[in-house]
Amino acid sequence: MTVLVLADHDLGTLSPATARVVAAVSSLGDVDLLVLGEGVDQIVAEAARLSGVARILVGQDQGFVTQSAEALVPVIARLASDYSHIVASAGAVGRDLAPRLAAKLDIQPITDIIAIHGPGRFDRPIYAGNAIQTVASAQPRQILTIRASAFSPMGDGGNAMIMPLPTDPVRTVAKMIAAHRTQADTPDLATARIVVGGGVSVGSAEGFKLVEQFAAVIGAGVGATRAAVDAGYAPNDWQVGQTGKIIAPDLYIAVGISGALQHLAGIQGAKKIIAINSDPEAPLVKLADIVLIADLFEAIPSLIEELAQRGIKP
Amino acid sequence: MIAITSDKCSPVYSIGRRQRSPLNSALRMARLSVSREVDFGRVTIAMPLPAVVTADLRLNTPRNAALPMVMKARQKKLDVRRADEFGVDLSPRVTIEKTTPPPARATGRTVDNVGALADEIAALHSGTEAH
Ligand SMILES: Cc1cc2nc3c(=O)[nH]c(=O)nc-3n(C[C@H](O)[C@H](O)[C@H](O)COP(=O)(O)OP(=O)(O)OC[C@H]3O[C@@H](n4cnc5c(N)ncnc54)[C@H](O)[C@@H]3O)c2cc1C
C-alpha cells in the first residue's frame, strides 16, 4: 500500500503539521509527499529530510499559490489511482479540498482523524469532541484528513527521491483578490507547546494585551475564545474551539475563560490545563488540573513578575 | 443527490451551512465575492455564478420569516421522490463501529495564590522544554 500525503506549507516553508501527518500514516505503507506551489525549493528540501517519506512529487505553478481546492484537486485526482490512501492535514486547505476530491472520485472521505487502527479503521471526534467514533471503511481507496495535533511529529533522517510532476497551466474560475495575514511573532498556535488563551472578560483589546504579555514571558502561543474574537479583542485566527483551531499543547493556560462546550472542543487534547478565573463554578475551573481563583487584572501582572523572579525564559 | 437536483432545478446559488469556514458574501451582478477565514487570517475570493458556498454563524443575523410567508410556504406542493429513482446509491460506505466518551481528565486542585501558581508554571515550563 502506498499513501499520498499533501504537504501543508505556508510562506515558503513546510508547515509543522506535515511531519505529524506523515508520522500518523507511516504505519499504512510507503509515503509519497505531494508538494504543490511555486518557488518551493526550501519546502522540498525540508520535506526530503522527513523520515519515512519515499518520494516527493513536486508540481510548480503560479496557480497553486493560493492553495485553492479548485487548483489542487485535479492534480491529486490524476494521481489517485496509484494510492491506497490520499491524505491531508485537517487544516483550512485539507478541509477545503477533501470534499471536492471525494466528490470527484466518488469516495466517502473520513475527516479529522485522531487515531489510526488499520488501513480502514479510524477514530474521529464527533459532537464537538464530546464523543469519539471508531469508523470502518472498505472502500477501494481512502480519502483522509488528519488532526495533526493528535500525533507526534516524524523525525528527520530521510532521504526521499524528488520527482518533478508535469502539470498543465492551472486555471481557476475562483480568484483570490485579497489576503489579510495576521501579523504576530507568537509561536504557531496549532503546534505551540504552551498556549495562553484569553476570554472576553479582558474587557478590551488593550486588556487582551495583558494575555499577550503573559504569553510572551513564557514563550507561549496565544489563543482566544470566540467571544473575545467577536468583540474584536483578538484576530479570528487565534480563536480556539469547535469553529476555530484545535490545539493539543503540553500546557494550556485559560485566563478568564468560562469553558463553553464549543471552546472545550478545541482544547481537549491539552495535556495539562490551568484555569485563572474569578468564578469557582466556571466549567473550565471544574475541568482544569490546576486552578487559581482570582481577578485576572490583579493576578496576571503579578504572575508575570513572579515568573520573571524565577528566571523563566521564553 | 445535490448535484442531480441542482441540474434539474438550475438554482442561482445554493447555500448550505458549514461551521468551519466562515464566509461573508456580497452578490455583485453575476459574480460572487466572499470573505473567508483561513489558517493565517482572512482572504477575499471572487467567482462567477452559479457557485456553491457555505456560511458561518458570523455571516449575519437570521431574518425570521413573516407569518404570511410561512402560510404561503405551507401551500406549496412538495415533490417527494426516492433517491433510487435518480440512480443514486445512498447506502453508507463507512460504518460506525462504536461511539465512546473521550478519556476522562484527572481531577484538579486549587492553588492559594499567584506565587504558588508561578511555581507550578515554572515547573511545567521546564518540563515542556525538556523534550
Ligand atoms: C455554533 C457555535 C460555535 C462556537 N464556537 C466557538 C469556538 O470555536 N470557540 C469558542 O471559544 N467559543 C465558541 N462558541 C461560543 C461559546 O459558546 C462561548 O460563548 C464562548 O466560548 C465564551 O467565551 P468566554 O469564555 O470568553 O466568555 P464568557 O462565557 O462570558 O466567560 C467569561 C469568563 O470570565 C470570567 N471572568 C470575568 N471577569 C473576570 C476577571 N476579572 N478575572 C478572572 N475571570 C473573570 C467569568 O467568570 C467567566 O467564566 C461557539 C458558539 C456556538 C453557538
Image (spheres, coloured by chain):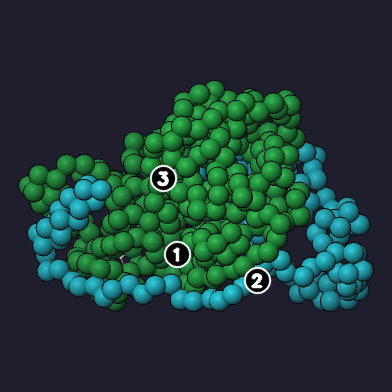
Q: Tell me the chain of label 3.
A: A
Classed neighbour count for the residue bearing mark 2: other residues with Cα under 10 Å, few (<14), some (14–19), many (≥20) = few
Residue farthest along the left direction in this orientation: A309
Q: Position of residue B71 (x, y in %)?
A: 82, 76
Task: Identify which amino acid the numbered label 2 is placed on.
Answer: Thr
Q: What is the CA distance from the residue labelled 2 to the residue labelled 3?
A: 30 Å
x then y, percent, for residue A134? 55, 70
Helix, strand or loop under label 3: loop
Which numbered disc, 1 or 2, marks the residue closer to the eye? 2
The amino acid beneath tag 1 is Ala
Disc nearer the start of the sequence (3/1): 3
Q: Residue at x 10, y 62 (%)?
A: B116
Q: Report the chain shown in green.
A: A
Q: Nearer the viewer, residue A221 or A151?
A: A151
Where, by quadrant of the figure, is residue B27 drawn? top right
Classify residue B81 as left or right of residue A258: right
What amino acid does circle 3 point to?
Met
Is there any visible trace of residue B125 in the rendered image?
no
For mark 3, what is the residue? A154
Specify the quadrant of the image occupied by residue A61. Answer: top right
- Report the chain shown in cyan: B
- Quote the CA–CA distance across marks 3 and 1: 25 Å
Q: Which residue is mark 2?
A: B95
The answer to whether A280 appears left or right of A204 in the picture is left
Image location of residue B83, percent across then percent down: 86, 69
Mark 1 vs mark 2, CA separation in Å: 24 Å
Q: Secondary structure at mark 1?
A: loop
Residue A284: image quadrant is bottom left
Please name the residue shown 20% across and 53% down the image: B127
* Mark identifier at residue A265: 1
